[in-house]
Amino acid sequence: MKYMPTDLISAHWKTLGDARKPPKLRVMATDLAVQYALPVVFGVCVALWAPDQLVVGVLFSAVAIFTGLVFNLTFNVTDKAIDIRRDEVRNNDANLITLVDTLRSNLNYTSLVGITLTLGLGGASMFATDGELSRGVVAVFGAMLAHLLILCLVVLRRFVLLHDQLRS
C-alpha cells in the first residue's frame, strides 16, 4: 500500500507541535490532554452511565453523514491548496502555505477518525443483538465520537487562522 493511514496520523501529529520550542517541534501537553485524554474520560463516562440498549443504527447514520461532509470539505480544501500554490502572488507567502497544509493535515486526520468510527458503528449495528454492546465497546465509540468533535473544533480554529491570514 503506497499511502498508509499512519501517514495521516503522523502529519496530524506534526501539527500539534509547538514551534516556539526548538530544535524539534514538541507536542504541547494541553493539546494531548484535550485531544486524547479528554475523549477517553468522556468514553469511560458514557460506558458507565449509558443506557443498556443503544440505538446504534441511528448513531451510525449520523456519523456516516457527518464524515461524508468532512470528507467533502477535505477535497475542497485540497483543491484550494492547489489553487493557492499555482497563484504567483500567494505562492510566496510561507505562512499561508503552512496554514493551508496544516488545515489539510487536520482535515485528513478528521476524515480518518470519522471513517474508522463509521466502520466500527456499521459493524456494531450488523452484529449487535437488540442494540446491546459491551461497556468496553461503548467506551471506545464514545471516546472516538468525542475525539471527532474536538477535531472539528481544531479544524474550525485553523479556518479562522487561515481567514485572518488571507485578510491581511
Image (cartoon, rainbow, N blue to C red):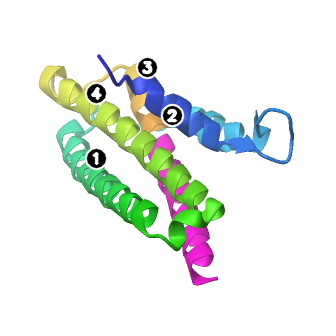
Image side of residue 112 versus residue 168, left or right: left
Q: Earlier in the sequence, mark 4 or mark 3?
A: 4
**Spot occupied by residue 77 in the image (x, y as percentages of width and height):** 38, 59
User: For the residue marked with disc 2, what is the amino acid?
Assistant: Gly
The outermost residue toward the top is 1
Q: Which mark is residue 81?
A: none
Q: According to the image, label 4 marks what residue?
A: 120
User: For the residue marked with disc 3, what is the amino acid?
Assistant: Gly
Q: Residue at x 49, y 35 (%)?
A: 143
Q: Earlier in the sequence, mark 2 or mark 4?
A: 2
Query: Could you tell me if the residues under marks 4 and 3 are in contact, i.e. CB atoms within 8 Å?
Result: no
Q: According to the image, label 1 marks what residue?
A: 63
In the picture, which quadrant includes the N terminus?
A: top left
Q: Residues within 10 Å of mark 4 (few under 14, many from 20)?
A: some
Q: Is residue 158 magenta?
A: yes
Q: Nearer the viewer, mark 4 or mark 3?
A: 4
Q: Which secondary structure is most common in the magenta stretch?
A: helix
Q: According to the image, label 3 marks what residue?
A: 136
Query: Could you tell me if the residues under marks 4 and 1 are in contact, i.e. CB atoms within 8 Å?
Result: no
Q: Nearer the viewer, mark 1 or mark 2?
A: 1
- The boundaries of the magenta stretch are 147-168
**Gap in angstroms between the C-alphas marked 4 and 3:** 13 Å
Q: Earlier in the sequence, mark 1 or mark 2?
A: 2
Q: Residue at x 45, y 23 (%)?
A: 6
**Spot occupied by residue 35 in the image (x, y as percentages of width and height):** 61, 41
**Spot occupied by residue 67 in the image (x, y as percentages of width and height):** 29, 48
Closer to the camera, 141 or 82?
82
In the picture, which quadrant includes the C terminus?
A: bottom right
